[in-house]
């Protein structure tokens, strides 16, 4: 079982909170967050990063089902 994560780079404001919470999952590039890799093992820190993102730019899915907060 794996999850996917994505960041809406148009919505991202580059706060870096996701990188602080889950540096193994997210990084900043050109002042915007992006996943280190799209497919991830289930990881509570991905859900936490999505939940605290001030721009609600992070989406975490288990197949077609959204498992994190929805923007």
Image: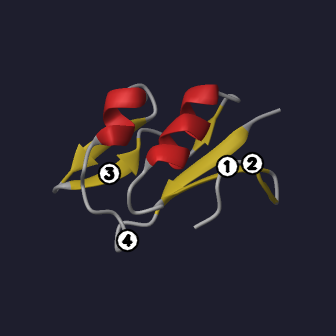
Residue pictured at 64% horizontal, 54% vertical: 69
| Position above or below: 64 against 38 | below
Q: Secondary structure at mark 1?
A: loop
Which numbered tag is attached to residue 67?
A: 2
Considering every residue shown, the one lying at the far left of the view is: 30
Sequence-wise, which precedes: disc 4 or disc 1?
Answer: 4
Residue 54 x %, y %: 38, 56
Which numbered tag is attached to residue 33?
A: 3
Q: CA distance from mark 3 to mark 1?
A: 17 Å
The C terminus, quarter of image: bottom right
Which label lies toward us, 3 or 4?
A: 4
Sequence-wise, which precedes: disc 4 or disc 2?
Answer: 4
**Tags 3 and 2 in contact by the CB under 8 Å rule?**
no
Q: CA distance from mark 4 to mark 1?
A: 17 Å
Sequence-wise, which precedes: disc 3 or disc 2?
Answer: 3
* The quarter of the displayed image where residue 18 is located: top left
**Tags 1 and 2 in contact by the CB under 8 Å rule?**
yes
Q: Secondary structure at mark 4?
A: loop
Classify 10 Å Cα crowding around label 4: few (below 14), some (14-19), many (20 and above): some
Classify 10 Å Cα crowding around label 3: few (below 14), some (14-19), many (20 and above): many
* Marker count (numbered): 4
Residue pictured at 62% horizontal, 41% vertical: 39
| Position above or below: 28 against 40 | below
Q: With 66 as the anchor, is 4 left or right in this view?
A: left
| Position above or below: 17 against 12 | above
Sequence-wise, which precedes: disc 3 or disc 4?
Answer: 4
Q: Secondary structure at mark 3?
A: strand
Q: CA distance from mark 4 to mark 2?
A: 19 Å
């Amino acid at each position: 079982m794996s999850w996917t994560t994505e960041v809406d780079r148009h919505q991202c404001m580059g706060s870096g909170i996701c990188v602080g919470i889950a540096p193994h999952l997210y990084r900043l590039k050109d002042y915007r967050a992006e996943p280190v890799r799209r497919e991830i093992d289930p990881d509570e820190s991905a859900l936490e990063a999505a939940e605290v993102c001030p721009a609600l730019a992070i989406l975490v899915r288990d197949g077609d089902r959204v498992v994190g907060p929805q923007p």
